[in-house]
Image (cartoon, rainbow, N blue to C red):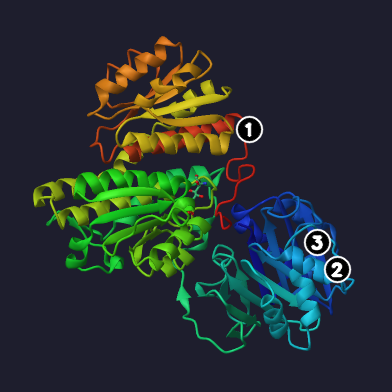
Amino acid sequence: MCGIAGYVGKKAVAPLLIEGLKRLEYRGYDSAGLALNANNQLYLEKAAGKVVELEKCVNAQPGLNELTGCGIAHTRWATHGRPTAVNAHPHLDGSNRFAVVHNGIIENYQELRRYLEGKNVHFRSETDSEVLVHLIAEAYEGNLLSAVAAALKQVKGTYGIAVISTLEPGLIVTARNGSPIVIGLGNGENLVASDVSPLLPYTSKVIYLNDGDIAAVYADKVDLRNINNMPVEREVARIDWDASAAEKGRYEHFMLKEIFEQPEAISNAIRGRLDAENGCSILNGLNLTPRDLAQISRIVIAGCGSSMHAGLLGEYYFEDIAGISTSVEQAAEFRYRNPIIEPNTLVIPISQSGETADTLAAVREAIRKGAVVTALCNVVGSTIAREAGRGIYLHAGPEMSVASTKGFTTQVAVLLLLALLLGRNRRLSRSEGIELVKQIEAVPDLIRSVLEQAPLIEEIAKRYAQVENFFYIGRGCLYPAALEGALKLKEISYIHAEGYHAAELKHGPISLLDENHPVLALANDVLGKDKIIGNIQECRARKAPVIALVAQGDTRVRSMTQDVIEIPQCSRFIAPLPSVVAMQLFAYYVAVARGCEIDQPRNLAKSVTVE
Ligand code: M6R
């Protein structure tokens, strides 16, 4: 959940690493640090708080910003040890000749720490990671890569690490087991990172390490090995994201930028994948023949957070459009619940980042049980995408804000494409398929018309910014949308928000309602409209203020509340998409009005790589 950046080459190292950490900050942001290897010594700076705090420390050291050579840096999301400067990475050995940054968890660190303390090693921090640097120093016999490999052999747990030493200037040793590492190949310079975002300004050529890989990265070459020091070959991949995609541009926050990018993101997600003539979709990455598709008897979807909410919509789509029995698993439960997976079960892990630990564990379990696995990921080359072996990329572009926006809506769009394909393979007629194609093609425009209402949504948001509790209610496909809307609000505004099925309110939670407990009702579903109107009346009867999302032209709901957001009319399958965009904007403006940190809410990290 933390971020790693490393550089070796001719450029000044510190500013480049700070820039890299800023691009990685969405992965963790409670403390940060860097170590530079120059002039036969290690220069270390660490700070609690965000990367700007580290930047201030670096700027305060005369000459540090000019140093060339190599360096490693880290932004942390605390697991073991408080978020203090001392616990920030890099960690140094007692002789200050080795520095290590680490993502992951060393499970046997207490045992290793006892062993090292028995040898009079002095520990400075409370972290599990610090054992690594002492083990490396102990194992060093003239070759840094061999020392790192020897240390890692003693470790149980997960790691993505980068190591430097004054004993071997101009070298970064990096290794991975369960925590991603990618090497960026430059011209006379090379980079190391925990994901591609810090590499984007410098190169589009990358090597993704596999678990068990270890690499010696010099400015002019990369030596790839396995942990037993045997050479390995890895493909050089190309990243097609450009650097500006990971910048805020004219927007104040990444979240707002990403909300407004959704029409384009969805166009990219569906481009070339719709066959309007045959009313079908074309999903080459699936790698399944029509016969394979016809044999699928069940679908199991696994994901976390917003990705699981997208999965809940997938359940509606696969059952209703394709007639395939579908269930959705919280990825964290998947491998512990021993789910029934038969040879014809299609398991669909959904993950924007492609690195979420629980979803990855679900992928491994599904593969172990012999399922057909097809991943929906956004980040190309991510661990889940690679381990699943087949899948559909979202093409949403980099999502930097911790709160998922375009990641979620492109997941839903891709699930619709998959349901269309499976449906046409079974019970969906050509004309029904053609109709669904038209509806999917219209989504970017539907979202645009919601975005045009941003000023109105902002106005409503300001009126509700000071409440402390919220219910979000919906029915049918708008029920998962309600869950997603509530998650957005609580995540960034710290308002307690619960998503509920509108009918469930009466089974307990309605007792909470009063004039201080508003309800956001998704009343724009043509099918369930009468019922949700009844639910809104129940809320109003308890004096609860109601914000309603209504279908354009609605008059009935309008007569019950003044706070109304119009959603363009569309089918029940499509309605969650523009509705969620309206709720993203609502959450955003509430959080802004409350003065909250938008892109990096407290306690969170973009990609949750620990269980
Ligand atoms: O990268 P993933 O899609 O696997 O991430 C899953 C969740 O951690 C993520 O959706 C999280 O819930 C978001 N912060 C919600 O906005």
Q: Is residue 243 rendered to the left or right of residue 583?
A: right
- Residue 320 makes an appearance in the image: yes
Q: Residue at x 43, y 69 (%)?
A: 387
Task: Quickly name the residue at label 3.
Answer: 45
Distance between the alpha carbons at the discs numbered 3 and 1: 30 Å
Real-space Cα separation, disc 2 to disc 3, in angstroms: 25 Å
Identify the mark nearer the N-term, 2 or 3. Answer: 3
Q: Position of residue 591 (x, y in %)?
A: 57, 33
Residue 1, by quadrant, is bottom right
Check disc 2 and report the residue beneath it: 117
The vertical placement of 233 against 550, above or below, is below
- Residue type highlighted by circle 1: Gly
Residue at left offset 49%, top offset 28%: 458
Say what secondary structure mark 1 lies in.
Answer: loop
Give the amino acid type for the residue marked by disc 2 in the picture.
Glu
Q: Which mark is residue 27?
A: none
Q: Is residue 35 visible?
A: no
- Left-right relation of 203 to 134: left
Callout 3 amino acid: Glu
Looking at the picture, does residue 558 appear above or below residue 321?
A: above
Q: Quadrant of the C terminus?
A: bottom right
Q: Residue at x 54, y 75 (%)?
A: 209
According to the image, label 1 marks what residue? 595
Give the image quarter of residue 597: top right
Which comes sooner in the sequence, label 3 or label 1?
Answer: 3
